[in-house]
Image: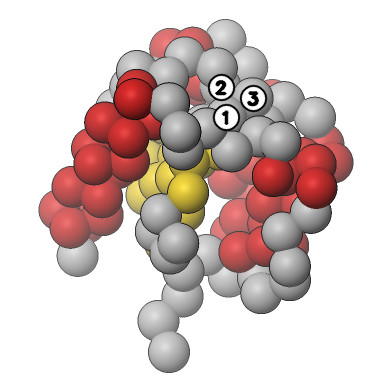
Amino acid sequence: MDPPTVVVCSGKDCRRAHPDDWADLVQRLDRAGARVVESGCLSICSGPVAVVDAPGAVYGKLRSRKARRDLARAVGGRPRSTRLAKRAVIKDTKAAKARKGALRAIRKAD
């Protein structure tokens, strides 16, 4: 079975404005066995932002250590926590566009 793919925004508001949070997120996802793909700005600007390939959820404001831990656990197969559910931004129209852009980044990386 292929590892889950997670697209992580590396735009200025995600990577440069929150470098420690961004690096911690990437490291946690890597340890969870996810395939991490960096993308350009996803235009959500509430970073760090991650798009999980399956089920196609977009998560923003992953600034707390616990939120990043919960995402890595969910990618690793555990149920999604309430804390992580609050970070989901899939209802936002920008998030829908971001998800499409992230899925394009996944296809390019394949």
At horizontal 79% and vertical 54% (from top left) the residue drawn is 81
State the separation of the CA atoms marked 3 and 1.
4 Å
Do tag 3 and tag 2 residues touch (Cβ < 8 Å)? yes
Which image quadrant is residue 97 in? top left
Q: Which residue is mark 3?
A: 61
Q: Which residue is mark 1?
A: 60
At horizontal 46% and vertical 69% (from top left) the residue drawn is 4
Q: Which residue is mark 2?
A: 47
Label 2 residue SS: loop
For residue 18, above or below residue 69: above
Identity, as a three-letter code, of the amino acid under mark 3:
Lys
Residue 23 visible from this viewpoint: no
Identity, as a three-letter code, of the amino acid under mark 2:
Gly
Which numbered disc, 3 or 2, marks the residue that appears first in the sequence?
A: 2
Question: Residue 2 appears at what percent x and percent y?
Answer: 40, 81
State the separation of the CA atoms marked 2 and 1.
6 Å
Which image quadrant is residue 36 in? bottom left
